[in-house]
Amino acid sequence: MGKVVFLDIDGTLCNESGRVPESAKEAIQQAYEQGNQFYLCTGRSKAEIPDDVLALPISGIIGAGGGYCEVEEEVILHRVFDAAELNKLIQFLEAHQVEYYLESNQGLFASANLRKLLIQLTLGETAEDSPEGQAKIQSVKWFLDLLIEDPSKIDYEDVNKVSFVNQSIPYEVIHEEYDGDFQMLRSTVSAFGPDSGEIGLKNINKRTAIETLLQHIQREKAECIAFGDGVNDIDMFEAVALGIAMGNAKEELKAVADEVTLSHDEGGIAYMLEKLDLINA
């Protein structure tokens, strides 16, 4: 029986442009054909997983940082915010002029000025009407196109996670307000800035979701491998026998990893799958 492999998306499976390197696509396909199973394990909600990732031979998805889990298209876990608590949280963010998006499996629902802020952050000092500026905007268009800006379409009883893009107040102010009530993390998307972050449900993380998934598919921790790059992948590594940090990973993750491979664009996933004999050389 092959291994069970968990793959983070941003900075691991996908590079900085949001694309899956061809080396990873080919290696994952080969390893799958040789009896290994692959599961996504990401902070993204299902609605923001790109098509080229979903086209891979994956057996299931852990999304929303552990709040959602499906195996072979069967939903086995789905935790959502209490609608009243969510509305209080939204009021706090809006009172402090913090932009945000609500993540659900139905889509990403953006605050009023989020799109404008994301374009500003993407452009930096580059003029929007310049060729370089247009190229920068094009690089994030896939994400901008996901944003739904009609509040009437939001189902407040079906929100997995809240991500905030914050240029207004220190991250610590938001963390202090909600740590203990929710799962607080700094954003893993560097372009959002150091004061941005994610707010998830308490006691929900990648480790708890992996444990639920393994029980469902009747596999053991000893059979599992995980690839990651961010601090939120520390929990994921605790749930598997072999945690592999990408070459571009945060130093905190490298410190607890069993192995450190090459970066995403250097073929880090393919290199390690071959090294572990999950694909033929």
Image (spheres, grey):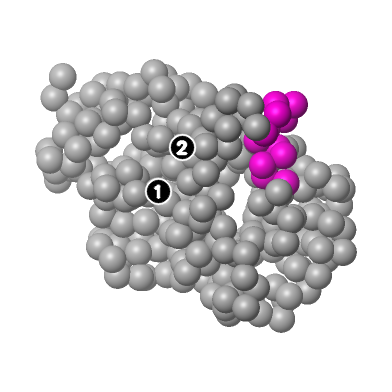
In the rendered view, tell whether residue 146 sits above or below residue 137.
below
Q: In front: 60, or 180?
A: 60
Instruction: Give the residue drawn at x 52%, y 48%.
Output: 143
Name the amino acid type tagged 2: Gly
Vertical arrangement, residue 216 with respect to residue 176, above or below:
below
**147 is within the stretch colored magenta:** no
What residue is shown at x 36% (from left), y 70% (from top)? 76
Residue 129, given in percent of the width and then of the height, sits at: 65, 32
| Image spot of residue 91 (x, y percent) | 81, 70
Q: Residue furthest front?
A: 129
Seen from the viewer's position, the closer of residues 271 and 91 is 91
Q: Quadrant of residue 241?
A: top left
- Judged left or right of residue 121, residue 248 is left
Q: Are marks 1 and 2 in contact (CB under 8 Å)?
A: yes
Q: Position of residue 85 (x, y in %)?
A: 72, 76
Marker disc for residue 50: 1
Quadrant in which the C terminus appears: top left
**Quarter of the image where one finds residue 223:** top left
Provide the residue span drawn in magenta. 117-128
Give the residue at mark 2. 18
Dot 1: within a 10 Å radius of its alpha carbon, few (fewer than 14), some, or many (20 or more) residues? some
Residue pictured at 23% horizontal, 24% vertical: 274
Residue 228's place in the image compared with 79, above or below, is above
- For image coordinates 70% across by 29% down, the residue present is 127
Q: Is 43 in front, or is 215?
A: 43
| Residue 255, quarter of picture | top right
